Image (cartoon, rainbow, N blue to C red):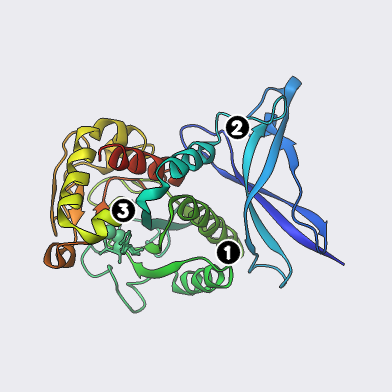
Amino acid sequence: MAYKAEYIWLDGTTPTAQLRSKTRVVESGHAPPIWGFDGSSTNQAPGDKSDCVLRPAFVCPDPTRGADDRLVVCEVLLAKDMSPHPTNTRAALTRAAELYVKHDAWFGMEQEYTFFQDGRPLGWPEAGFPAPQGPYYCSVGSGLAFGRELVEQHMDACLRAGLAFAGINAEVMPGQWEFQIGAIGPVAMADQLTVARWLLHRIAEAHGVSVSLAAKPVKGDWNGAGCHTNFSTRAMREDYAAIISACEALGARAAQHIAGYGHGIEERLTGHHETCSYAMFKYGVSDRGASIRIPWHVAKDKKGYLEDRRPNANCDPYTVCRLILETVCSAV
Ligand code: ADP
Ligand code: MN
Ligand code: MN
Ligand code: MN
């Protein structure tokens, strides 16, 4: 007997890497082996040295196929010496996670995304615009929530894959939704978000719907799409002073974080639509106009976590987790 292994990796497309995947049939009882692909077709290699290596890094059940089938998130390596390919942001996160393992960091990411069909957000009229924002966030009912069947299928798939899936909600812009994963360690966080994104694209295929992770999918008076990243170390889960120190450390490296939080961030972090301008940094309790929000219950309990509201929906989760880990953990 054999099982199907879907090898998933991030390509070299700029400014935002795209997910790629292909299937290998593997003999039962064997782990998915090292494999390769044509890097000249993914912006990862020139045609005359096209071979790139796929090294399996995270394996979970594939809910889109049979019980024995697997999804396999891979690191891309250079064929010449098996070192990480320049597009392999997972390798650097793994190093940081090992360096700061004593901090016992947890991440929880809130992935926002927008369904599209026929060139416009799902549920939008053929001409003109839907009624202004207000009733759509956490809505129920036709004419308000668009695409729920898909959202439910995706949630079930993530749970069957064994991901630390935490919840879903309809978002402020019609056709836009959010799911949350976590709280889990940094490498698990980024691997699981990668799987959850792949499943979303894959499941939407069957409905003729596409998924956009664009930071500002519709210009004008419509919310952008982010990937709020909740973060704690053991010290922060025990002591409020550690949360304030973490906010201060993040402020000292604000520009570096903005540069690593996804393409088009200036269009999204305008200072409107529940954001703080990309050119400013501030943190505050319950403040959805801040770069970093300290949730009210964290301020009340005097311990817990912070929410970095800046990462874009199209961010690279490996880079976001690495930046936060390095900035907060190197400061103490
Ligand atoms: P919001 O109010 O910003 O919409 P959500 O409920 O969507 O918040 O997401 C909050 C996320 O915070 C949860 O999904 C969870 O994964 C994460 N979280 C909770 N506690 C911690 C913690 N101690 N450290 C890191 N992340 C956490
Ligand atoms: Mn949320
Ligand atoms: Mn949200
Ligand atoms: Mn949030």
Q: Secondary structure at mark 1?
A: helix
Q: Are the residues at dot 1 and dot 3 in contact (C-beta closer than 8 Å)?
A: no
Farthest residue in the top direction?
48
Residue drawn at x 22%, y 37% as measured from the top left: 278
- Residue neighbourhood size for the residue with mark 3, other residues' Cα within 10 Å, grouped as few (<14), some (14–19), many (≥20): many
Can you tell me which quadrant of the image ligand 1 is in? Answer: bottom left
From the viewer's perspective, is residue 148 above or below residue 117?
A: below
**Mark seen at residue 37:** none
Give the percent coordinates (x, y) of residue 84. 60, 32
Near-viewer residue (293 or 205) = 293
Residue 260 appears left or right of 192: left
Q: What label does residue 233 carry, if any?
A: 3
Above or below, 76 relative to 317:
above
User: Where is mark 2, residue-wise?
Assistant: 84
Q: Which residue is mark 1?
A: 203
Q: Position of residue 53 (x, y in %)?
A: 70, 36
Is residue 4 shown left or right of residue 209?
A: right
Say which amino acid is labelled 2: Pro
Q: Secondary structure at mark 2?
A: loop
Give the residue furthest to the right. Answer: 1
Kind of residue sitting beneath label 1? Ile
- How far across and how far down the image is residue 46, in percent? 68, 22
Which of these two is toward me, 247 or 21? 247
Structural distance between the alpha carbons of marks 2 and 1: 30 Å
Determine the residue positioned at 64% across, 66% down. Answer: 61
| Whether the residue under disc 2 has CB within 8 Å of ligand 1 | no
Give the Cα separation between the discs numbered 1 and 3: 34 Å
